[in-house]
Image: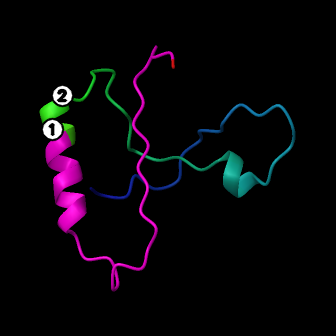
Amino acid sequence: MPDPGPTNRSAPVDVPVHHLIRDRWSPRAFLPDPVDGEDLARLFEAARWAPSSGNSQPWRYLVTYRGAVS
């Protein structure tokens, strides 16, 4: 994806933060649609088989759903 260059977007902040943080913008966004359970299972299976530097990293994944109550 091409770099969009400088933008005039600033995050609304309640307390002052450094301008590099406040003005940071990412072109990525989450879709409002939930991810299918089969797709999640495929993702975790691929992650299980991915290289991890001698299996020494403590991998953890957190999955949550909008509106879910636990």
**Mark on residue 36?**
2
**Relative horizontal placement of residue 62, taking residue 34 as reference (left or right):** right
Q: Regarding mark 2 in the picture, which secondary structure is present there?
A: loop
User: Does the CB distance between marks 1 and 2 fall below 8 Å?
Assistant: yes
Q: Regarding mark 1 in the picture, which secondary structure is present there?
A: helix
Prevailing secondary structure class for the magenta stretch in the rendered image? loop
**Relative horizontal placement of residue 16, taking residue 61 as reference (left or right):** right
- Report the Cα–Cα distance between label 1 and label 2: 5 Å
Q: Is residue 7 above or below residue 14?
A: below
Q: Which residue is painted at 44% across and 43% down in the image?
A: 62
Q: Which sits in the foreground, 35 or 4?
A: 35
Q: Is residue 65 above or below residue 54?
A: above
Q: Which amino acid does the dot numbered 2 rest on?
A: Asp
- Residue 46 lies in what quarter of the image? bottom left
Q: Which residue is painted at 83% across and 31% down in the image?
A: 14
Please name the residue that numbered disc 1 is placed on: 39
Q: Is residue 45 magenta?
A: yes
**Relative horizontal placement of residue 8, taking residue 17 as reference (left or right):** left
Number of marks? 2
Would you call the spot at circle 1 few (<14 residues within 10 Å), some (14-19), or many (20 or more)?
Answer: few
In this picture the colour scheme is rainbow
The magenta-colored residue range is 41-69
Q: Which residue is painted at 31% across and 27% down in the image?
A: 31
Residue 30 placement (x, y as % from top left): 36, 33
Residue 58 placement (x, y as % from top left): 46, 67
- Residue 20 lies in what quarter of the image? bottom right
Q: Which sits in the foreground, 34 or 46?
A: 46
